[in-house]
């Protein structure tokens, strides 16, 4: 069972689909190094700011205990965003330094907005560098891309 943050918040499963889920930080603190498991498989979500949502490609994931950090301690960190396009994925980062790419989760939805599945992009195919960068990838238009950008090389 996930441990709540000191403020009473938690990282919770906000949406569930076949083999995928959307997690949400429902607290006022940043969640750092969040282990998420499904069976024998574990992924680590590097960081979730308060209110932020991120996709995971796991079936019925269980969220483990995170390290909780005051948002002001992150020194102006902002989440890296990504948009799927016809030529690949465009990444945008307002951070002043490059973060460490840990890959990305790509979630697919049907016309009604329901999650229908997903895939993962390898770390080498994801940009966590400052500014905008488009990298080639075969991703269905309209898919949601969630970069996993870590603060350090850990």
Image: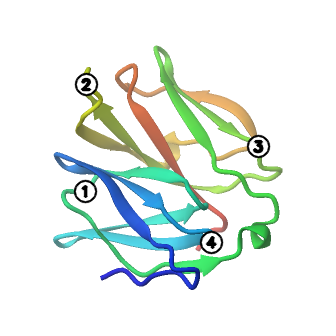
Colour convention: rainbow
Question: Would you name the residue on which mark 2 appears?
Answer: 112
Q: Nearer the viewer, mark 2 or mark 3?
A: 2
Under circle 3, the secondary element is: loop
Looking at the image, is mark 1 or mark 3 earlier in the sequence? 1
Q: Nearer the viewer, mark 2 or mark 1?
A: 2
Q: Residue at x 61, y 60 (%)?
A: 49
Looking at the image, is mark 2 or mark 3 earlier in the sequence? 3
Question: Gap between marks 4 and 3, in whole Å?
Answer: 20 Å
Res 29 label = 4
Question: Would you name the residue on which mark 1 appears?
Answer: 58
Question: Would you name the residue on which mark 3 appears?
Answer: 94
Q: Quadrant of the C terminus?
A: bottom right
Question: Gap between marks 2 and 3, in whole Å?
Answer: 32 Å
Q: Residue at x 26, y 20 (%)?
A: 111
Determine whether label 4 and label 3 are within 8 Å by CB: no
Crowd rating for badge 1 (residues with CA inside 10 Å; few <14, some 14–19, many 20+): many
Residue 94 rendering spot, x and y as whole percentages:
76, 43
Question: Gap between marks 1 and 3, in whole Å?
Answer: 29 Å
Question: Gap between marks 1 and 4, in whole Å?
Answer: 24 Å
Residue found farthest to the front: 8
């Amino acid at each position: 069972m996930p441990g709540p943050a000191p403020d009473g918040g938690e990282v919770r499963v906000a949406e569930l689909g076949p083999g995928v889920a959307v997690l949400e930080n429902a607290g006022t603190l940043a969640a750092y190094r969040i282990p998420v498991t499904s069976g024998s498989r574990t992924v680590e979500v590097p960081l979730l700011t308060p209110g932020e949502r991120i996709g995971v490609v796991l079936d019925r994931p269980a969220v483990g205990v995170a390290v909780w950090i005051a948002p002001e301690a992150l020194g102006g960190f902002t989440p890296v965003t990504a948009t799927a396009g016809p030529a690949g994925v465009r990444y945008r980062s307002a951070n002043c330094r490059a973060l460490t790419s840990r890959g990305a989760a790509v979630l697919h939805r049907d016309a009604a907005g329901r999650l229908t599945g997903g895939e993962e992009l390898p770390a080498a195919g994801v940009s966590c560098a400052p500014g905008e960068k488009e990298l080639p990838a075969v991703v269905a238009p309209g898919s949601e891309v969630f970069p996993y950008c870590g603060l350090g090389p850990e």
